[in-house]
Image (spheres, rainbow, N blue to C red):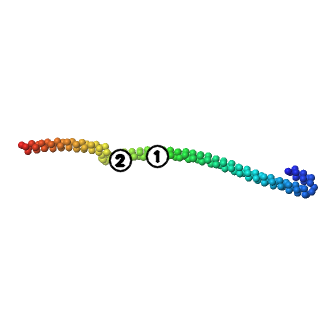
């Protein structure tokens, strides 16, 4: 195209031919620009659609990875919470045992009987009550027999 302008400029004596050549070149440039614009629009839509598809694919992968990470973190948090709960429970049990031992020692120093001692005494009282009833019943029968003999004599 540059060569054509040089040929025209060198070989053309009149301004009319030069003006016509410039108009023709300008027309061709204009048409080339319109073609490029049309092609860019066409290709732009295709590129846009490809980009939308790639974006959708990336979003799906990102969501999947996010869900996996959330599940992993949730699992770890649950495990840590379980471990903390076990430790707290163990510590609480130890504290309760220590408290019970100290209360038991304090009550022993004060002379308060233990549950075991009370249970032993209760059992012993029940045994003695049964023996008293048995002896009381035997004596009552013996007294009735004696009364029966003294009234008949």
Residue picked out by circle 2: 103
The mark total stands at: 2
Q: Choose mark 1 or mark 2, whichever is in front.
A: 1
Residue picked out by circle 1: 85
**Helix, strand or loop at disc 1?**
helix
- Of 1 and 137, nearer the camera is 1
Q: Residue 29's x, y, as percent? A: 82, 54
Q: Residue 2's x, y, as percent? A: 86, 51
**Helix, strand or loop at disc 2?**
helix
Q: Residue at x 48, y 44 (%)?
A: 83
Q: Residue 84's x, y, as percent? A: 48, 46
In the rendered image, which quarter is residue 135 located in?
Answer: top left
Q: Residue at x 62, y 48 (%)?
A: 59
Graded by Cα atoms within 10 Å as few (under 14), some (14 to 19) or many (20 or more), the crowding at tag 1 reads few
Quadrant occupied by the C terminus: top left
- Of 10 and 125, nearer the camera is 10
Q: Residue 62's x, y, as percent? A: 61, 47
- Of 1 and 35, nearer the camera is 35
Left or right, 98 with respect to 112, comes to right
Q: CA distance from mark 1 to mark 2?
A: 26 Å
Left or right, 134 with respect to 69, comes to left
């Amino acid at each position: 195209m540059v060569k054509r302008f040089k040929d025209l400029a060198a070989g053309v004596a009149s301004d009319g031919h030069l003006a016509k050549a410039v108009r023709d070149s300008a027309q061709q440039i204009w048409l080339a620009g319109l073609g490029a614009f049309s092609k860019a629009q066409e290709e732009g839509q295709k590129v846009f659609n490809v980009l939308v598809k790639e974006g959708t694919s990336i979003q799906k992968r990102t969501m999947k990875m996010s869900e996996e990470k959330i599940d992993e973190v949730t699992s770890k948090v649950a495990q840590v919470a379980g471990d903390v709960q076990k430790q707290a429970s163990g510590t609480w049990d130890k504290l309760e045992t220590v408290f019970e031992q100290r209360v038991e020692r304090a009550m022993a120093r004060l002379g308060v009987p233990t549950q075991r001692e009370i249970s032993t005494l209760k059992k012993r009282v029940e045994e003695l009550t049964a023996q008293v009833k048995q002896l009381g019943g035997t004596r009552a029968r013996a007294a009735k027999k004696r009364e029966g003999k003294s009234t008949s004599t």
